[in-house]
Image: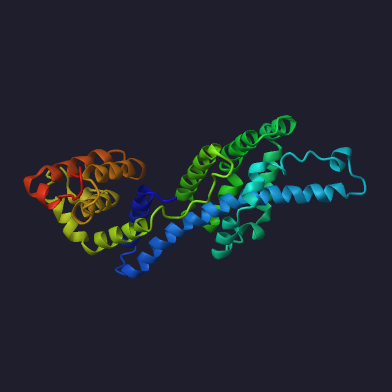
């Protein structure tokens, strides 16, 4: 689930927090970094389990309504298309989801079932829901299309849900869009087959976790040394006026040049330019690109930043 850009962003945020706190407790902030990555998995599992909870709550409501003494004709003979949605039923059957929720002790919806009720209300008030119930076509493809639109148009942008989760997860504002985009992508690729869906692991490869931790350590243990790589080579910029975020991004990029020989220089530069565009000042990407480009072109650094592997520079 977490790609290298996500990991670089997590490292950036952790370094920034450590510097702002004026702490030298590397072990403490390594734990902070690991926790921030784990939070993304928790949010992912919670959002996936929301589908299950929504379907289950609606099914319970239907059963209670049937037994009412003065039940309406619609309550006695309800439209069951939503609770019989094949995609929602498949998600409810995923043992991996149940196991990982249990392992992480994620009982959030049990303690905040009002959030599920908000979502159900928003879903049932939508034209999307009404059109789906009235559509006589029943197929896996139609069920999947509905679930995808329900998530994209109703669940993910729900303001009440956002505010509730923000109170419980400090990184929610940054992580929520990333997780939702990932889930939407999963739902779109699920069209390849009803049995193609599997929950994503937190790391695509265990090497990714090691990469994040090693990058964090290399930057913090060599912070002043990394800064010296460019502080005398930026005559047009006063070091004291360079934004802290830009200094961290430069140090991270140079750490990759020096200590991660398998990562191509172009990949490193492009990654940090994209992060700068989104998380730093408007001109940061131009500044960072100028500094890094100048560094990699010097004869001395062409040797020092040498990469190993076919086609790496």
**Is there any visible trace of residue 15 in the rendered image?**
no
Q: What is the x, y in percent for residue 91?
A: 62, 49
Of 203 and 216, the residue lying toward us: 203
Q: Which of the 4 image quarters holds residue 275?
A: top left
Q: Is residue 99 left or right of residue 75?
A: left
Pick out the residue farthest to the right: 69
Q: Is residue 79 left or right of residue 204?
A: right
Q: What is the x, y in percent for residue 35?
A: 43, 62
Q: What is the x, y in percent for residue 108?
A: 61, 59
Q: Is residue 292 above or below residue 114?
A: above
Please count the marks in the image: 0
Q: Is residue 161 left or right of residue 234?
A: right
Judging from the image, the colouring scheme is: rainbow
Q: What is the x, y in percent for residue 22?
A: 30, 65
Tell me which residue sits at (51%, 42%) in the image. 186
Q: Is residue 307 left or right of residue 99?
A: left
Of the 4 image quadrants, the one containing the C terminus is top left
Q: Is residue 177 above or below residue 108?
A: above
**Is there any visible trace of residue 192 in the rendered image?**
yes
Q: Is residue 65 above or below residue 131?
A: below
């Amino acid at each position: 689930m977490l790609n290298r850009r996500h990991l670089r962003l997590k490292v950036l945020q952790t370094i920034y927090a450590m510097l702002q706190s004026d702490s030298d407790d590397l072990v403490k902030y390594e734990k902070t970094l690991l926790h921030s990555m784990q939070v993304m998995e928790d949010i992912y599992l919670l959002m996936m389990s929301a589908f299950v909870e929504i379907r289950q709550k609606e099914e319970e409501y239907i059963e209670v309504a049937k037994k009412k003494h003065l039940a309406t004709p619609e309550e006695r003979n309800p439209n069951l298309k939503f609770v019989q949605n094949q995609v929602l039923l498949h998600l409810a059957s995923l043992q991996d989801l149940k196991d990982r929720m249990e392992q992480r002790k994620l009982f959030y919806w049990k303690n905040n079932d009002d959030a599920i009720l908000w979502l159900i209300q928003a879903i049932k008030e939508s034209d999307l829901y009404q059109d789906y119930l009235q559509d006589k076509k029943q197929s896996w493809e139609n069920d999947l299309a509905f679930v995808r639109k329900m998530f994209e148009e109703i669940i993910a942008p729900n303001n009440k849900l956002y505010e509730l989760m923000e109170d419980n997860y400090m990184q929610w504002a940054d992580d929520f869009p990333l997780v939702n985009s990932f889930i939407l992508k999963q739902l779109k690729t699920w069209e390849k087959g009803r049995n193609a869906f599997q929950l994503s692991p937190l790391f695509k490869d265990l090497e990714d976790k090691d990469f994040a931790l090693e990058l964090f350590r290399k930057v913090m243990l060599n912070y002043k040394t990394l800064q010296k790589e460019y502080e005398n080579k930026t005559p047009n910029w006063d070091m004291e006026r360079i934004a802290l975020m830009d200094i961290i991004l430069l140090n991270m990029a140079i750490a990759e040049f020096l200590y991660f020989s398998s990562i191509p220089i172009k990949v490193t530069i492009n990654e940090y330019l994209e992060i700068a565009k989104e998380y730093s000042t408007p001109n940061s990407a131009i500044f960072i690109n100028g500094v890094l480009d100048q560094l990699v072109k010097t004869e001395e650094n062409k040797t020092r930043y040498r990469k190993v592997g076919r086609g790496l520079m």
